[in-house]
């Protein structure tokens, strides 16, 4: 039996990689993918704890997270398409119109 | 070293490598493919942890639906690569340093602060199966379940509205 | 049935008494509201009817008093209730008040009728129906106020009437407020009205103080309560009774035109003649006499006040009589005569001869109203004559237009032109002169007879005054009606129409036979008034006939008439000829003519210093000191400094604005620095969130 700690450590590593992806990539689509990675890291931790305590609710939460992620991706990608139509670019550093 | 551990570490290695691949690959298509691989490994982890339904959902929803969507968009837009840009160059080192600090914090919490990990319990039959999940979902979580259906509907309408081409568009 | 009841219980109609006030009020309201659509005749008839109805009511009350001589108090409404002060509208019906009501109602009605004709003919009227209506509204208002005055049950309600008649007097003296006697544009009449009002105010002040003192002392101003307590209070606090009665005397001198406040009455002749007759001869000016007669129980407790009242009256009687001798204006002579006769009455009621005073009041109302109305008839007749002169002589812009129809020097020989007026005037004059058997003889003689026993000084003064009275009225008769006309207009004068002469004839009849009211030995009037006085245990004299006094005064009057004949009758005054008395008396006559310079004296010692003082206060104290220096320099200056320098420059700009501006510039500067954080790069924002997560977790760990 693998200790839950290992899963959590893996989850933390994947989460950090995802966060780093959000922070250092400029491609809006890749940023989205990084966000999906972070969500998956969190889901992994949920499932690990579900196994540890034997309570099914964690998996139900994962289910909800997936739903939200799907919705988010649908809307996010639609936004990217809309932005691309006007800017012909998906470099999010180009989207700095709100510069102070 | 049990086979379980070997499996875990090799899968973990794949997961981290694919994650890093996502992080550093220049081409968005490669990034997407790395992520698909990552999702598959995570699905296997779910199976190891007794979440059979979740693992299937992971494969079909994430690796299947979501990533296909990503690939479609990348290919439609034809924007898998970005040109060079040196905007906010300081961002990258700062982000890396902060990430390391976060990892150190996580490691500190996990290894020095928490109590020793307790042995995993033996699971009841059918744990994590569609029946058990469905039972909880449609009893204890009926309202959130319904709300997610509305959420999905809204997202669908929103996506359609956002991508819908106006007839007055200059491209026409 | 009703008659039999009347026979057994007598007439008891006291409840009707409020109608003596209501009828004239109704009359004036109708005239005010509907008068605009009514003809002159309708307006006058309505007003006269209202006045006549009050006389009917007064007569019914008098008849009721014959069987119920104790009278009654008729409660109408509550008025003021503050603490112990409990005032009500209540009417006192007794022989005294009903006497006054009958005089006011009777003489008032006759004068109303007379005024219908007079106001129509007044040169200043010029068919101004609005003015005509206003005159009768005022006249009815006067009747109402006078009725309140005489019928009240307490001093404050009396004061309401007292002020009301004063107001009507003011309104009617200044009735032609925009024209003078001759119809020219002028404010003389308004000034005369103002003078009357102000002089009356001084008297009213005395009355008010008397009322306040009375309430303070007696805790009531009701006649009944006050008079009942008078004896008790007088023994406890004689000074207070004296003060009340003396302040009341001030009110009397104002209203009844006695020294020192008599100066307004001659000027009051500026009003239309019916006004002079009704208000300034027959009724209103007798209010003071009535007040003293009404307050008899109080005056009986203050012999000093009685003496004061007597002397004021007697001196006024003589003083005014001498002035009357020197006047040329037909109405001015009568005005001073009125003051003089009022002096007789005041002296009489002052010395305690209340019946004699009231008797003379009634007789005087008859004959003086008669004289005034006849004088008005004379003036109208001359004006008619003036109107009929050849047109060239009274061109609108002619200098000769300045013609005073009231100046006796323009008259003469009117006996032939105006026979009715002459005869009634003669009757009034004989009555005034005190020649038997006319009304004036009995009343004046009664006063003189009483004076012999009560106050010798007053007796002497009054006898001399009576002598002058006979002289000036005889002088007037000869100047006006005998000799030759001294002016074209007089030569063409015409007799007045019946609406004017009929009231004159009625009054003349009353002036002839009025003496029967209190004929020596019968004393109807004395017995009549006794009922009122007996209630408060005031003993009134029976008015004994004194042959010595009667013969003395009659002889003196005849001598005076003879002297007048010598001076004015034997050699009638010629045109432009100075008065024969002037040659004989010299400066004394000038003094008489100039009213002994009383007006000038008042100007010199009171009005001019007062005006100078008010100028000083207005110009120096108020304007120079208060406005220019204190307001402008001190208050405005310091306020300027406070606002412009201290508050504006230092506090507002230097402090408050500095804070506000400082906050603004700090915000601006910090914003210009902080806005650089807002790079617009989403990744930067994500980084800051990440930084926050790291820091918070670090904080949680360290904690």
Image: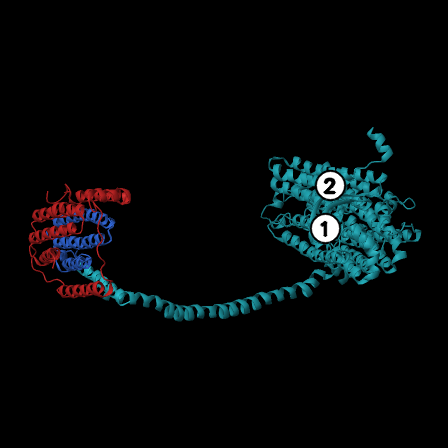
Which chain is in cyan here?
C
Badge 2 sits on which subunit? C
Residue nearest the observer in this picture, C635 or C568:
C635
In the displayed structure image, the side of residue C122 where residue C502 appears, left or right: right
What chain does badge 1 belong to? C
Q: Is residue B152 left or right of residue C586?
A: left
Give the labeled residue for mark 2: C18
Lower position in the chain sequence, tag 1 or tag 2? 2
Which is more foreground, mark 1 or mark 2?
1
Circle 1 sits on which residue? C86
Q: Is the same chain shared between marks 1 and 2?
A: yes
Quarter-wise, where is residue C419 in the image?
A: top right
Viewer-proximal residue among B121 and C294: B121
Q: Residue at x 47, y 70 (%)?
A: C638
Q: Position of residue C239 (x, y in %)?
A: 80, 63
Closest to the observer, B80 or C661: B80
- Could you say where residue C511 lies in the image, as x and y percent from the top left? 82, 43
Q: Position of residue C73 (x, y in %)?
A: 78, 44
Residue C490 appears in the figure: no
Q: Is residue A93 visible?
A: yes
Residues tagged 1 and 2 counted as in contact (Cβ below 8 A): no
Chain in red on the image: B
Q: Position of residue B91 (x, y in %)?
A: 15, 64
| Colour blue, chain | A
Mark 1 nearby-residue class (10 Å; few <14, some 14–19, many ≥20): some
Position above or below: B166 against C291: above
The quadrant of the image that shows the C terminus of chain A is bottom left
Instruction: Depth check: give the residue in front, C40 or C473.
Output: C40
Q: Mark 1 and mark 2: span between their CA atoms?
A: 20 Å
The kind of secondary structure element at disc 2 is loop
Category of crowding for the residue at label 2, using alpha-carbon neighbours closer than 10 angstroms: few (below 14), some (14–19), many (at least 20): many
């Amino acid at each position: 039996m693998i200790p839950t700690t290992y899963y959590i450590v893996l989850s933390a590593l994947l989460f950090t990689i995802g966060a780093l992806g959000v922070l250092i990539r400029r491609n809006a689509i890749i940023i989205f993918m990084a966000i999906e990675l972070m969500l998956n890291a969190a889901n992994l931790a949920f499932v690990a704890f579900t196994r540890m305590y034997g309570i099914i609710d964690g998996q139900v939460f994962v289910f909800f997270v997936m739903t939200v992620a799907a919705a988010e991706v649908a809307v996010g990608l639609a936004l990217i398409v809309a932005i691309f139509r006007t800017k012909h670019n998906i470099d999010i550093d180009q989207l700095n119109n709100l510069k102070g | 070293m049990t086979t379980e551990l070997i499996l875990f570490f090799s899968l973990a290695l794949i997961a981290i490598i694919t994650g890093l691949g996502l992080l550093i690959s220049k081409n968005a298509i490669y990034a997407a493919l790395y992520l698909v691989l990552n999702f598959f490994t995570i699905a296997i982890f779910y199976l190891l942890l007794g979440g059979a339904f979740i693992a299937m959902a992971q494969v079909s929803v994430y690796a299947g639906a979501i990533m296909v969507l990503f690939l479609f968009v990348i290919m439609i837009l034809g924007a898998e690569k970005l040109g060079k840009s040196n905007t906010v160059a300081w961002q990258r080192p700062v982000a890396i340093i902060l990430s390391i600090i976060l990892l150190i914090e996580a490691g500190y919490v996990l290894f020095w602060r928490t109590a020793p990990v307790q042995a995993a319990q033996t699971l009841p039959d059918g744990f994590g199966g569609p029946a058990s999940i469905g039972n909880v979902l449609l009893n204890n979580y009926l309202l959130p379940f319904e709300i997610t259906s509305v959420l999905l509907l809204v997202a669908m309408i929103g996506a359609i509205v956002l991508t819908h081409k106006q007839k007055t568009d200059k491209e026409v | 049935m009703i008659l039999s009841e009347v026979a057994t219980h007598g007439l008891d109609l006291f409840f009707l008494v409020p109608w003596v006030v209501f009828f004239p009020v109704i009359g004036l309201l109708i005239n005010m509201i509907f008068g605009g659509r009514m003809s002159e005749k309708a307006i006058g008839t309505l007003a006269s009817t209202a006045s006549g109805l009050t006389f009917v009511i007064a007569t019914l009350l008098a008849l009721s008093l014959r069987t119920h001589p104790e009278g009654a108090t008729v409660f109408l409404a509550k008025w003021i209730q503050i603490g112990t002060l409990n005032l009500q509208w209540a009417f006192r019906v007794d022989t005294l008040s009903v006497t006054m009501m009958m005089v006011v109602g009777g003489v008032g009605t006759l004068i109303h009728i007379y005024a219908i004709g007079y106001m129509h003919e007044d040169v200043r009227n010029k068919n101004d129906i609005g003015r005509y209506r206003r005159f009768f509204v005022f006249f009815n208002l006067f009747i109402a106020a006078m009725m309140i005055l005489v019928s009240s049950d307490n001093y404050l309600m009396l004061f309401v009437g007292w002020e009301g008649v004063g107001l009507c007097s003011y309104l009617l003296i200044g009735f032609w407020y925009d024209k003078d006697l001759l119809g020219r544009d002028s404010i003389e009449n308004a000034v005369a009205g103002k003078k009357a009002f102000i002089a009356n105010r001084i008297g009213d002040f005395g009355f008010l103080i008397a009322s306040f003192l009375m309430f303070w002392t007696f805790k009531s101003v009701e006649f009944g309560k006050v008079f009942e307590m008078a004896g008790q209070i007088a023994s406890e606090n004689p000074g207070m009774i004296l003060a009340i009665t003396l302040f009341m005397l001030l009110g009397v001198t104002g209203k009844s035109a006695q020294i020192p406040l008599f100066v307004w009455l001659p000027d009051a002749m500026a009003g239309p003649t019916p006004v002079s007759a009704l208000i300034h001869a027959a009724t209103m000016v007798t209010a003071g006499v009535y007040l003293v007669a009404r307050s008899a129980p109080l005056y009986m407790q203050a012999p000093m006040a009685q003496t004061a009242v007597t002397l004021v009256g007697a001196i006024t009687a003589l003083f005014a009589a001498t002035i009357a001798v020197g006047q040329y204006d037909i109405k001015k002579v009568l005005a001073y005569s009125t003051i003089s006769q009022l002096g007789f009455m005041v002296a009489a009621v002052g010395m305690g001869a209340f019946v004699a005073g009231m008797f003379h009041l009634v007789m005087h109302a008859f004959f003086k109203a008669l004289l005034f109305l006849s004088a008005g008839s004379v003036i109208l007749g001359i004006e008619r004559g003036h109107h009929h002169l050849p047109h060239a002589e009274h061109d609108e812009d002619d200098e000769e237009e300045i013609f005073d129809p009231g100046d006796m020097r323009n008259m003469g020989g009117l006996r032939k032109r105006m026979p009715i007026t002459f005869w009634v005037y003669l009757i009034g004059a004989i009555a005034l002169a005190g020649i038997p058997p006319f009304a004036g003889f009995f009343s004046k003689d009664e006063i003189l007879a009483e004076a012999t026993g009560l106050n010798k000084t007053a007796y002497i003064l009054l006898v001399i005054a009576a002598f002058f009275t006979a002289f000036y009225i005889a002088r007037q008769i000869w100047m006006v009606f005998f000799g030759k006309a001294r002016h074209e207009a007089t030569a063409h004068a015409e007799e007045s129409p019946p609406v004017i002469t009929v009231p004159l004839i009625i009054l003349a009849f009353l002036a002839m036979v009025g003496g029967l009211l209190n004929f020596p030995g019968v004393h109807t009037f004395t017995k009549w008034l006794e009922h009122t006085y007996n209630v408060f245990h005031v003993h009134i004299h029976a008015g004994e006939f004194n042959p010595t006094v009667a013969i003395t005064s009659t002889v003196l009057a005849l001598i005076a008439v003879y002297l007048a004949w010598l001076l004015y009758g034997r050699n009638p005054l010629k045109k432009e000829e100075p008065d024969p008395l002037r040659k004989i008396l010299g400066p004394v006559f000038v003094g008489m003519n100039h009213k002994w310079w009383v007006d000038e004296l008042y100007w010199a010692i009171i009005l001019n210093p007062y005006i100078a003082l008010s100028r000083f206060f207005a110009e120096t104290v108020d304007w120079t000191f208060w406005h220019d220096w204190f307001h402008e320099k001190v208050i405005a200056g310091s306020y300027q400094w406070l606002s412009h320098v201290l508050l504006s420059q230092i506090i507002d700009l230097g402090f408050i604005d500095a804070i506000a501006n400082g906050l603004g510039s700090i915000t601006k500067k910090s914003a210009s620095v902080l806005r650089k954080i807002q790079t617009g790069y989403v990744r930067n924002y994500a980084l800051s969130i990440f930084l926050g997560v790291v820091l918070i977790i670090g904080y949680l760990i360290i904690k």
